[in-house]
Image (tube, coloured by chain):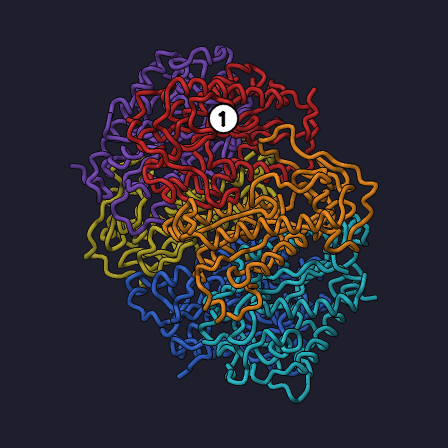
Chain colours: A purple, B red, C orange, D cyan, E yellow, F blue
């Protein structure tokens, strides 16, 4: 169920136990071969499929494409909120939904740079409403809602998400092949930090001249469809747990 | 030309005199009969038509549906940024485009509640870059880019935009009639403030129990099409002036 | 009635329906011929006359000369609050008066650069006290409280307010001719933006080297007196509506 | 020399070694007998006399009556900036004058509640411009610019400034006796904190029901004139040192 | 090498390639049996041992005990910075060290609640200095600097860190047994969220009445010594990589 | 009694009339001869002695070494919070203790640069909790809690505290002589401002090249012991007044 299609009287009539899912993504450089709207397109497609699967049991806010992408600002076309403004925006969204009486609020994230700020926002909001024991405030990233790593098949060269990589390129090839530039000549750019698992402050220029990280040359539309199915399944399974929550327990108390 | 479809290398290759148009709208209650996404749908359609008309001469950012709608917060389904967070977001967008080298930046607005904050943001940004004489920072509202009031035809009962009114309802009837509830029983709610032209702080509950202001019962899809054509024409004419700007003069210096 | 002359016990004894009028102006360059205190002097005179006319029915805060004038900061002598600090100051004034129990709070503005921020502040404050239905929060500019344009007589070359122009120069000639420099040699500087009615971010240097906009060479003290009488009349008529407000209705409900 | 009377071209022509004095005061309750504008009136008179004495060697900004008075907010009529907004305003004033090229900037303060925030603002500003060795940023309170305590005569019962007290009441009796209520019946309210010299957070209600602190019953207009002369002399002597500063030395380097 | 013991001239003389390690911890409830300073004590001991091991090759800032612990605020004795103030403090520390010329700055963290904000701060700082390619900004948590999970021995019931748990209790038993209350009667409290790996906003009261999470009843001082040795070894190995960094490469470029 | 050694249940069991003392100091340059941790070491020692003297009647928070030292930032090794972040941190500490039910909260300060911001924080907090009449919020500096100046003996050349001076150097000589560099060659640097008692914005470079102010060459460990005894006695006497406070009176109402 899409919130944006409802009248206010219909929103008022919803059970306040209905989870609100707010998809949050980004507009930022995705290498020489993918459009800047990539993250928003991918999350949009996962959300579209999951919305269809779950029907009226979950209410979806419109996708917020403005994300936390200052690490990509050296590349034209990146549109990014200031880090603190982004925290304010996410906190404000939670405030909105709580003001309207909802109790289960989920950021469904589609951009690596949003992981930390959405966690920070969920923390801040939970403390702001610390006397409320009936709130479920979550932030989940669509490629990381289930056990890791996914078993995607032997033809994949990556076993985790990177940036403008085999995975993302495959999904855009599935979704909008006319927007994909030539990928044959793209060299793989290794991911990871020598200091992992420490959090390492970076800008993309530290890591990749063309802008991609991973191996986009191995992408195919067929892999993209497999990825969409996999992630949609994971997201739906995750949201089923949100629906089934008993309204009080940290550990789920799933019926 | 839609920025979101471009790769960063394509954005880099654009002339930096290309106007960037950032459509800004809202998600907020629109009475008993219209969906909360109304403002975003209407501006999206005007932008879609204008984008088509202007081709590669203007670059369009994706539409930002998160607006300044706290005056509607008593009605469930409204999603609104905190007033100061909204100012930060708009300032940040201008910063982004200037960082990428662009000089003509236009907020194309589709929500009454955004008029003052987008003017404030344009002011703040202009002062922040006060030594730049080559910047054109504008905020324009799609129903108010040309001379007022428009000559729309004798069958219109309103001669200016209100909220969830004859005009907006007509355009949604044109665009998505399946999302429009019954309008026959809706009474006209008068607009205006007894203290006009003073700026009058209000919440919607001060003015309208159902949420609409104006006379939605007079709406038709055909009026909607006329409005879309009128506003698209006005917006295109306005953007032509932005394109034609000589790069320096306050008064246009149009070639 | 001037708040500043009262003891706290006298303020406590006032009816809380008494409108509080807070005059807000500016200190900023006014061309080669007028003092930087021009806006504050002019609003001060209008306020003085209106205060005299309305007696004990309205309480006047002292005039706040610190305004939003960063667009004039290239000219020495301009004293201007940071844009956000100015919003905070105006919000704080509203908070003060509400804390003391008052319900009708009016910014009476005398500076173009304050129009947007005072509207923003009134909006923000109204949302902050959104559960209060008995509040009347207004921001009005002294030359724009009534129908526009005024009918001032055929000898006027301007039909609206500009900056350090025929109108302002005339009024300072009436009020403090010893502070006015030679005006004969001043050329008219055209106002307006080629992109009107869009909001256009500007600094004064974009528009005028000497600092004035409009035609100060046509000013006379006699015109100034006519302007003072006209504006005082308009302000008094506006404040009479504030006094007559029924305490609840958006549309006035004037008795 | 009053800045407010100058044209911007005259401000531009000033030597940038001219000290800028910004008088900062307050609007706040002053007991049952004095008007809320007391601090602004008193500082205004001291400033007027000192301005007259020093002529063109010092430039005076207009008096900022909005101060830091939240400790008096329980008493109607108090108008006070939020503490952080006040810090922003004072920092902004310093920024203004530095932007216009001035190097010697003095807050001349007339309100106890401004002492700490003006010191904080001066500190913050000095750090913000830490590479400037030619700046002299000062905050001084008119009753504490010279050696303490003053030798005022044997008929004084107070030997230091309190609030709405012998000293302040005497000066208002000198300046505007028609605004002074009956003082015979006012009991002395002792000042000081049992925890002095520690900084003790307080609201006026902690200390005085009527609002005054000290012994206003002993006030006379004649004492007021003596106080004005004394404080004006002290302020002038202090400003002479500012004028005589060698432009570099912490310890004065007075010629 | 401890920064705190150095004179400023000694800090100036240090190679600016010397890593600065800033230990950040917390003061917060640690169940019925451990003191509120637990996190600070444990990190302090790990830092003490690592400092000893690495000698003059690393400079250690004093431990900042004030952390991000609002989720524990229902329990008296917790001392916690406001979430945004904590971000400001961490950003400020990075600014300090960069101002003094250092290029390798590491937060060594000892508190779960600091993981997200220190990552956010490192991100924000990296963007603020985005033109600097010679900076290495890291945030690492002492129990998670190496491969996970550690192989600690068969007598451990936990294989990861929890709160006031087997691991923390063991280390405090090793360090300060006189501060440990009775642990026999403490029941194990399960960790984890039913919605993992999603980020789940929580307060401790959501999860544990006594305040601990995990199984403190299994703690021994001997286990504590093993943990200290293990974590010290991991931290030293991590800091060796920081020392060996080639000054440019994201992937280490370790010599 | 040290808060850090307590379990949360023990903090909960404390009388909420127990004064909480939060020692606040700094890490900043202290000339060529003293370590940057000087202020924190000295306050730590005074606090240690006073804690011992007062036993369970006062609860001591851990010492916060991060202070307001931007005026020393030209000297490497200084670690300083941004001025506003420091205000936030201090306000947050007060909020913490009030949230836990305590009513008597004292900043015991050991750094000149903290005097103004801790006063500002105490003011801000008192206003934030303005309806609480049972709060005692104080900020006191250890060398200025009693009557001034102290009578320390004829061999002292200074009669008040300066920076890295006779007094501070003596106390570090008493506490950690191995951290003191040669002092024989240090010239006395005069203190004071030519504009005293005005608040004078400064950076240390304005006043002293080596970083000290005062006459460190006259320091001895024996003087240091005398100073510690004197200041401890003063602090204890001050805290006895806090303990003895009647819970309501500004003027103490000491039993």
Camera-side residue: D229 or E30?
Answer: D229
Q: Residue F112 in the image: x percent, y percent?
A: 59, 65
Camera-side residue: A197 or D45?
Answer: D45
In the displayed structure image, the side of residue A58 where residue D241 appears, left or right: right
- Single out the residue that lies furthest toward the bottom: D154
The picture quadrant where one finds residue D165 is bottom right
Q: Quadrant of the C terminus of chain B?
A: top right
In the displayed structure image, the side of residue C207 where residue F77 appears, left or right: left
Q: Chain of mark 1?
A: A
The residue depicted at 65 percent of the width and 81 percent of the height is: D221
Q: Residue C32 in the image: x percent, y percent?
A: 78, 45
- Single out the residue that lies furthest toward the front: C154
The residue depicted at 63 percent of the width and 60 percent of the height is: D64
The residue depicted at 24 percent of the width and 35 percent of the height is: A14
Tag 1's secondary structure?
loop
- Single out the residue that lies furthest toward the left: A255
| Residue behind mark 1 | A28
Q: Residue B64 in the image: x percent, y percent?
A: 46, 29
Please say if F10 is above or below F73: below
Q: Residue C199 in the image: x percent, y percent?
A: 58, 34
Please say if D76 is above or below D132: below
**Is residue D124 at all visible to an observer of this figure?**
no
- Number of on-image labels: 1
Please say if B223 is above or below A199: above
Camera-side residue: E240 or A98?
Answer: A98
What crowding class fits label 1: few (fewer than 14 Cα within 10 Å), some (14-19), or many (20 or more)? many
**Is residue A251 at all visible to an observer of this figure?**
yes
């Amino acid at each position: 169920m899409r919130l944006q299609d409802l009248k206010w009287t219909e929103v008022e009539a919803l059970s306040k136990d209905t989870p609100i899912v707010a998809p949050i993504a980004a507009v930022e450089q995705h290498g020489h071969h993918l459009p800047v709207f990539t993250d928003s397109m991918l999350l949009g497609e996962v959300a579209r499929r999951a919305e269809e699967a779950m029907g009226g049991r979950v209410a979806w806010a419109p996708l917020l494409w403005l994300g936390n992408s200052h690490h990509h600002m050296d590349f034209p076309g990146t549109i990014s909120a200031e880090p603190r403004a982004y925290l304010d925006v996410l906190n404000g969204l939670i405030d909105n939904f709580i003001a309207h009486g909802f109790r289960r609020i989920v950021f469904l994230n589609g951009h690596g740079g949003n992981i930390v700020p959405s966690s920070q926002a969920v923390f801040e909001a939970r403390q702001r409403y610390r006397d409320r024991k009936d709130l479920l405030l979550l932030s989940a990233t669509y490629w990381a809602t289930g056990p890791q790593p996914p078993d995607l098949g032997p033809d994949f060269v990556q076993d985790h998400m990177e940036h403008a990589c085999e995975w993302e390129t495959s999904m855009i090839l599935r979704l909008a092949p006319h927007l994909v530039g030539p990928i044959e000549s793209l060299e793989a750019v290794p991911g990871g930090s020598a200091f992992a698992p420490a959090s390492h402050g970076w800008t993309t220029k530290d890591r990749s001249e063309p802008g991609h990280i991973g191996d986009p040359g191995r992408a195919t539309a067929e892999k993209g469809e497999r990825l969409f199915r996999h992630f949609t399944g994971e997201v739906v399974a995750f949201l089923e747990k949100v629906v089934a929550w008993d309204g009080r327990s940290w550990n789920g108390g799933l019926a």
